[in-house]
Image: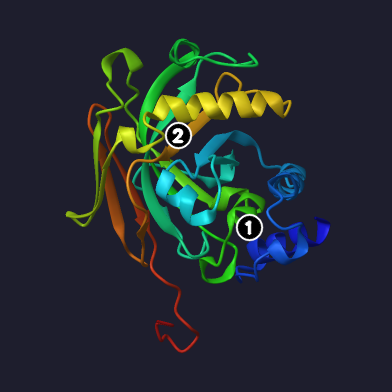
Amino acid sequence: MARAAERLDRARRTGTPCAPVRDLLPAGDLDAAYAVQSLLTERRLTEGRRVTGWKAGLTSPAVQAQLGVGTPDFGALFDDTAVPDGADLPWGAVLQPKAEAEVALVLGHDLEHERHTVADLIRATAFALPAIEIVGSRIRDWDITAVDTIADNASSGAYVLGNRPVSLRDLDLRTAGMVLERRGEPVSTGVGAACLGHPLHAAVWLADTLVRLGRPLRAGDTLLTGALGPMTAVAPGDVLEARIEGLGSVRAAFGAAPRDPEGEDPR
């Protein structure tokens, strides 16, 4: 597990994707993968980073089937991966980036029960926001299994939140439509029901799972509840805008690719 963590951390620090880590871990051992993720989280904390919340991944049954698992996964969000709405994310800050639109929940109360209900989540949520998650893989060519992506912090890269908080009492997240556009052209569409049937179902799963692991969700945490539609690839200079019914819009912008010393674009 230490070797797997070092391989992934070196990829993060150097900006060079690495080989998969599944060869270093027992086949299909998700607990071992989460142990690697925890080692990497501790490294980030010792560097002075702060956990700002958590993300649920693999919330699509189709993606679960593709990776051979029957549950979602999760990863930590950090303060240095939060990008302001519309601000440029420097190209290369996230390795092999892709984007997806999600519902974000910001908690007003702790969630410490062994088993939570949807009502618990509604009561604990201060407000919801539209979000774009920039997923990225430290593993070369996205050659991943469930073990790889869990160890790699659920392929978390960066995230962008909208700026207009909305109360859950004003939303029907199950039927909320989503469109993700690149310079005005739709590249992904979906609906709240695509996320485990309802984004709150993903939030309940995340709350229960983290309590079992001894690190319950706390007031102030941001939860990314999972993709509402297919991921889309991004390129240098792209500007993406997601609109979610009832929540409004949020934009993610990507910087230009760096040029080589001769001034030639490396592409």
Give whichever of discs 2 and 1 has the lower sequence position: 1
| Relative image position of residue 183 (x, y in whole percent) | 21, 57
Residue lying at the far right in this picture: please name it: 2
Q: In the rendered structure, which amino acid carries the disc numbered 2?
A: Thr
On the image, the x and y values in percent for residue 146 come to 59, 53
The Cα atoms of the two marked residues, 2 and 1, are separated by 20 Å
Residue name at image x 38 percent, y 25 percent = 128
Q: Nearer the viewer, residue 191 or 123?
A: 191
Residue 177 shown left or right of residue 224 in the figure: left
Measuring from the top left, give residue 160's x and y in whole percent. 41, 42
Crowding near the residue tagged with mark 1, few <14, some 14–19, many ≥20 C-alpha atoms within 10 Å: many
Q: Residue at x 54, y 46 (%)?
A: 81
Q: Is residue 250 above or below residue 125?
A: below
Judge whether 248 appears above or below 266 on screen. Answer: above
| Residue plotted at (36% across, 62% down) | 234
Q: Quadrant of the N terminus?
A: bottom right
Question: Relative to the observer, which residue lies in front, 77 or 25?
Answer: 25
**Side of 204 where 24 appears, left or right:** right
Residue 16's x, y, as percent? Answer: 61, 71
Numbered-mark total: 2
Q: Tell me the kind of residue under disc 1.
A: Asp
10 Å crowding of disc 2: few (<14), some (14-19), many (20+): many
Give the residue drawn at x 42%, y 25%: 200
Q: Farthest residue in the bottom direction?
A: 262
Please identify, in this view, whether the residue under mark 2 or under mark 1 is nearer the observer: 1
Residue 148: numbered disc: 1
Dividing the image into 4 quarters, which one contains the C terminus? bottom left
- Vertical placement of residue 128 versus 255, above or below: above
Q: Mark 2 = which residue?
A: 225
Q: Nearer the viewer, residue 128 or 211?
A: 211
